[in-house]
Image: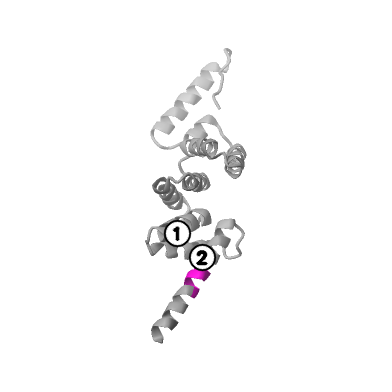
Amino acid sequence: MGRIIKNGGDAMQAETEMKTKLRAFARGEMTWAEVEGMTFEEAKAIAQVGCDLAAAGRLEEARIVFEGLVAGNPQDSASRAALGTVYQKLGRIEDAVSEYSLSLETDPQNPVALANRGELKLKSGDRGGFTDLAKAVESDPHGETAAGRRAKGLVKAITLMAVEAAKADKR
């Protein structure tokens, strides 16, 4: 995404603008994506490539794409959740949970981060995972995302198991 400054009348103005942007980046006032001038549409297109790579099983390449997007814009909740998903598929569970948690700091209603983190927490024996799953269902009540649908199914299954266990205890 590097920009080439051509020699000419606008070169000094472009250099001054870049210095201003770099200072803003250093102060934490801009993301690297903003410094480079990446648009939402460009980021979305790059993320789609990452999703396509992951779907094709090309997880290392997808990891590189999403790590780049997160480096460019650490506040991008969707890219963090996608990176978490890739880490999860690669077996990097701690990294996945970390990315899901960082995603939720920016967007506490991200159904992908909630569902996947919830599932991982439950697998590790942390009952707090049920709370994440319930929040994922709340954030996607109509099951518009695969994560929301999976969370809804898991919540139903866990609830049914709890009801059956309670019935068995009463006998």
The spot of residue 167 in percent (x, y) is 44, 83
User: Contact, CB < 8 Å: mark 2 with mark 1?
Assistant: yes
Which residue sits at x=62%, y=59%? 144
Based on the displayed image, in which of its 4 quarters is residue 45 positioned? top right
Local packing at callout 1 (Cα closer than 10 Å; few below 14, some 14-19, many 20+) is many
Q: Amino acid at mark 2?
A: Leu
Residue 74 falls left or right of residue 57:
left
Tag 1 or tag 2, which sits nearer the N-term?
1
Q: CA distance from mark 2 to mark 1?
A: 10 Å
Residue 170: image location, x then y, percent: 40, 86
Residue corresponding to mark 1? 118
Q: Which residue is mark 2?
A: 154
Task: Report the residue at 46% width, 58% height from top.
Answer: 119
Residue 85, horizontal then vertical, whole percent: 50, 48
Q: Check disc 2: other Cα within 10 Å, few if <14, some if 14-19, many if 20+.
A: some
Q: What is the span of residues highlighted in magenta in the rendered image?
A: 155-160
Question: Which color scheme does this rendered protein use?
Answer: one colour
In the image, is residue 160 above or below residue 37?
below
Image quadrant containing the C terminus = bottom left
The residue drawn where x is 61% and y is 37% is 42
Residue furthest to the top in view is 7
For residue 29: magenta? Answer: no
Please give the count of numbered marks on the rendered protein: 2
Q: Magenta-highlighted stretch: main secondary structure?
A: helix
